[in-house]
Image (tube, coloured by chain):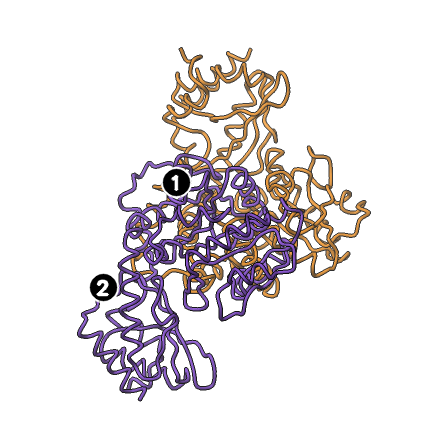
Chain colours: A purple, B orange
Amino acid sequence: MSGNKSLQEAFNGTVYRVSGNGKRNIQVLKEAFESVEENTESDVYGTGKLIEDFQAKLAKVLGKEAAVFFPSGTMAQQVALRIWCDQKGTKKVAYHPLCHLEIHEQDGLKELHRIEPILLADKNQLITLADVMNMKDEIACLLLELPQREIGGQLPDFTELEAISAYCRQQGIMLHLDGARLFETLPYYGKSAAEICALFDSVYISFYKGIGGIAGAILAGNKEFTEKSKIWKRRHGGDLISLYPYILTADYYFTLREHKMGQYYEAAKELAALMNQCHAVATLPVEPVSNMFHVHFECSKRELEPILAAIYEETGIGLVPVLRETGEASSYCELNMGDSYAAIPKELLRKAIQLLDEKLK
Amino acid sequence: MSGNKSLQEAFNGTVYRVSGNGKRNIQVLKEAFESVEENTESDVYGTGKLIEDFQAKLAKVLGKEAAVFFPSGTMAQQVALRIWCDQKGTKKVAYHPLCHLEIHEQDGLKELHRIEPILLADKNQLITLADVMNMKDEIACLLLELPQREIGGQLPDFTELEAISAYCRQQGIMLHLDGARLFETLPYYGKSAAEICALFDSVYISFYKGIGGIAGAILAGNKEFTEKSKIWKRRHGGDLISLYPYILTADYYFTLREHKMGQYYEAAKELAALMNQCHAVATLPVEPVSNMFHVHFECSKRELEPILAAIYEETGIGLVPVLRETGEASSYCELNMGDSYAAIPKELLRKAIQLLDEKLK
């Protein structure tokens, strides 16, 4: 019976989800706005108390002089790299081969800014100090993504980060942080956001990953940098008359979840350990270092889908709605732990994992 | 006493406003979301019923094959011009010297797209067929703004528009409509939006002018054009995971106000006629052709501010919070008629105008 249901359909019918903070429906907005005074004035083209207060708050959290709210990270990061390129008078930057700018932005960096990226490191590895030191091209900026999402959310040791930062400063290379999931890394590093950001010249963070807002981003750095970023934000068409629907929800969910990143991190380690007990299943990393990890299956997407769908139906627990193919007999999925995991009865979860193990034998 | 209050302070204290649809506070959002089901699913990166239904609805209204929702007009219009330039293989477009792209976008078109604009017509005049025919440069696209906002919202005759459109088609020049205030022009033209858009190859409309939404824009044209625009929207950083806060409010206020444009147009004509009876006051245009017009004063900003502040205090009617200087002894303001005007008791309005006349003698 379950074989007739698609994975997405079976997932839609589940009571529990291991990943995320719940459905992306408009209740996410309504909940955040419930407690906001109706006569609260809109921000107006990047000015006004509402946006300025939030920017000041996040600048402080990140330990930077100033911060600017952007509608998206795509816009914020292109702008950051452009500013550093213009400052140095070169059109080259370096980043990981699976960097968001390289694979998810339709080449905006190249098409709009004519910036040439140098791809550092093998795509399945983190960027190391050696990669940076061996680079032959003169670059304006190095972008590091913490955690490196496309390889399961891996993180370099903090000492490696410090060494890369020190080398870049010595070489006059600006260091930019793709911190879309920065807060999710803090429990592993045992550091504050400001302590990590101190290693970087500019920082981008997102509000709809672990934080669970609607959309929106912050770009932070020194005042000269953020003032320039406002000009580029207008050029990109991101200086909207009102950004408050994103700002107020970002603020609400940041306050709600900032301190729960430790819980999500522990949940990721617990679930990954359970998964790794299953036949033909391995997580990447083996032990997660943030709230996220990938689950690799030695089983094709086509074979695995009905197996997962049957488990979803039997237990009411949903793993993911979509699997991705990695080869003829292998597939994977990404899990991001949030509020949803804590609601699952542990016995039921164990049963689901046990079923998975049995069916993959 | 009133002389001590700034114009902005006096304006903030008024009960009635001649311009606009009310305050830009978060109640604008709350009202629109009140009637939306809480489990309505978010759009996801430009897909999903919520965004696709609204795009289809507006494509139909504008008589175009397809439409794409953008976070801003700045983004939508740069994208439109880029697509037409790429198609023709030239980097030149033409528009009015006071075009939004020329004076309000920090040169995004030039800095991001390397497009060179040819400025057509004197800045105080509308673009005419003769201007277009006399142009020596080969351009990919001509942008016309209806109404021409920076000169009081003037409009060409419809026959002139038809002639420009016919000439452009004959010459292989794409015609793009900056229709930020398109719906506001329909009562004057006595045409449907689709009838006007039929003269153009691509159309942008805004949802926070006469419509009174929070932000957001639609870009419409043929399917090939709109599909390309989605790629550029992602490059610009405008393909947000969720745009629903803008889409749902745009839809709500479009439904609420689309049919009130005639009322706003009549209000503009009525108020302009009253204004023109005042000493040292002249509206541009003398008789408005949309819901907007400019009011020019033969009086310096410095002298006029305390006069207006005193009138605001005495009558409780606010004209504008800010005046703009045009010379040592002249100033002006812009008025956009919306819902607010109808609430003003006519006797009180006449008194305010009479006071203005007396004080300017």
Q: Tell me: residue B339, above or below residue A308.
A: above
Disc 2 residue crowd, few under 14, some 14–19, many 20+, Cα 10 Å? some
Q: Tell me: residue B76, above or below residue B328.
A: below
Residue B300 rendering spot, x and y as whole percentages: 58, 17
Discs 1 and 2 carry the same chain letter: yes
Three-letter amino acid code of the residue under disc 1: Lys
Judged left or right of residue A337, residue A91 is right
Which quadrant is home to the C terminus of chain A? bottom left
Q: Nearer the viewer, mark 1 or mark 2?
A: 1
Residue A46 rendering spot, x and y as whole percentages: 47, 39
Three-letter amino acid code of the residue under disc 2: Ala
Tell me, yes or no, if residue B350 can be seen here.
yes
Judged left or right of residue A137, residue A287 is left
Q: Name the foreground residue: B129 vs A144.
A: A144
- For mark 2, what is the residue? A342
Q: Secondary structure at mark 2?
A: helix
Disc 1 residue crowd, few under 14, some 14–19, many 20+, Cα 10 Å? some
Chain ID for label 2? A
Judged left or right of residue A188, residue B75 is right
Chain ID for label 1? A
Q: Tell me: residue A50, above or below residue B302.
A: below
Residue B115 rendering spot, x and y as whole percentages: 70, 50
Q: Which mark is residue A60?
A: 1
| x 53%, y 43%: residue | B184
- Disc 1 to disc 2: CB gap under 8 Å: no
Q: Which mark is residue B180?
A: none
> Who comes first in sequence, dot 1 or dot 2?
1
| x 54%, y 41%: residue | A225
Q: Tell me: residue B219, above or below residue B273.
A: below
| x 26%, y 72%: residue | A14
